[in-house]
Amino acid sequence: MLAPFDKLLGGGLPRGKVVELSGSQRSAGRFSIVIASLAAATSAGEAAVLIDLGDHLDPRVAEAIGVDLRRLLWIRPHTMKQAVMAAEMITATGFQFVALDAGLHPIRGKRVPDATWVRLARSAEAHDTAMLISTPYPLTGTASEAVVTAHSARTKWIGRGKSPRILAGIELKLTLQKHRHIRPGKCETLMLKTFESCLD
């Protein structure tokens, strides 16, 4: 997956646990991290699920970045309640990796109760599923193993002088806000390349 994100979590997304990735900026890179996670899981031969409340997935781009679409189940719910229910049901079927992307603020549908997140975390633990929840603001509370925030996004450009400037990617800061086994407050910098840069 993405080395700086893995490092904050002490070695990547843990099996049987919920990890929340939050960030309110539109350019915070949350969905790019979700896609990178799906690419890592499916390229390793695992079956993965994307619950895409924000409806952001472009299958063509995802495949070019490395997602094996044959191993990906794409679910497009209409509300947050439907998204969490889908995550709980699909986890019970044995998928190794489940990603839920809540989209941008405001999230569609009413806020789900804390008990729902606790139940989802128990389901992930019971079925040894790695679960990544991507949200514009923290939602999972005590149910998550770890919470990472993505922030301080800055654009990076290539080209100087008379040559045209080309967007190389977005640099963002990741901060570990909470972890049950690691001291919070650690930061890592992540460079997300543009789609064109990834193809070079």
Image (tube, helix red, strand yellow):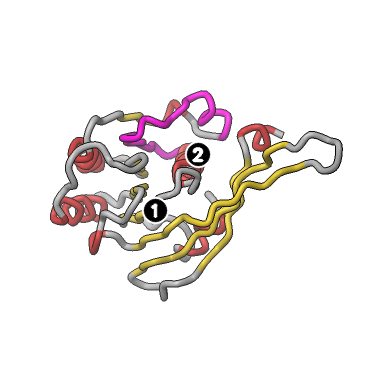
Q: CA distance from mark 1 to mark 2?
A: 17 Å
Q: Amino acid at mark 2?
A: Ala
Q: Secondary structure at mark 2?
A: helix
Q: Amino acid at mark 1?
A: Leu
Q: Earlier in the sequence, mark 1 or mark 2?
A: 1
Q: Which residue is mark 1?
A: 21
Magenta span covers which residues?
45-65
Question: Of all residues shown, which one is farthest toward the right?
Answer: 162
* Residue at 84% across, 35% down: 163
On the image, the x and y values in percent for residue 189 come to: 58, 59
Q: Is residue 44 visible?
A: no
Question: Of all residues shown, which one is farthest toward the top?
Answer: 60
Q: Is residue 57 magenta?
A: yes
Q: Is residue 116 magenta?
A: no
On the image, the x and y values in percent for residue 147 come to: 36, 61
Quadrant placement of the C terminus = top right
Within 10 angstroms of label 2, few (less than 14), some, or many (20 or more) residues? many
On the image, the x and y values in percent for residue 10 come to: 47, 66
* Residue at 49% across, 31% down: 68
16 in relation to 80, above or below: below
Question: Closer to the camera, 153 or 135?
Answer: 153
On the image, the x and y values in percent for residue 41 come to: 46, 42
Is 6 on the left-hand or right-hand side of 142? right
Q: Which residue is mark 2?
A: 39
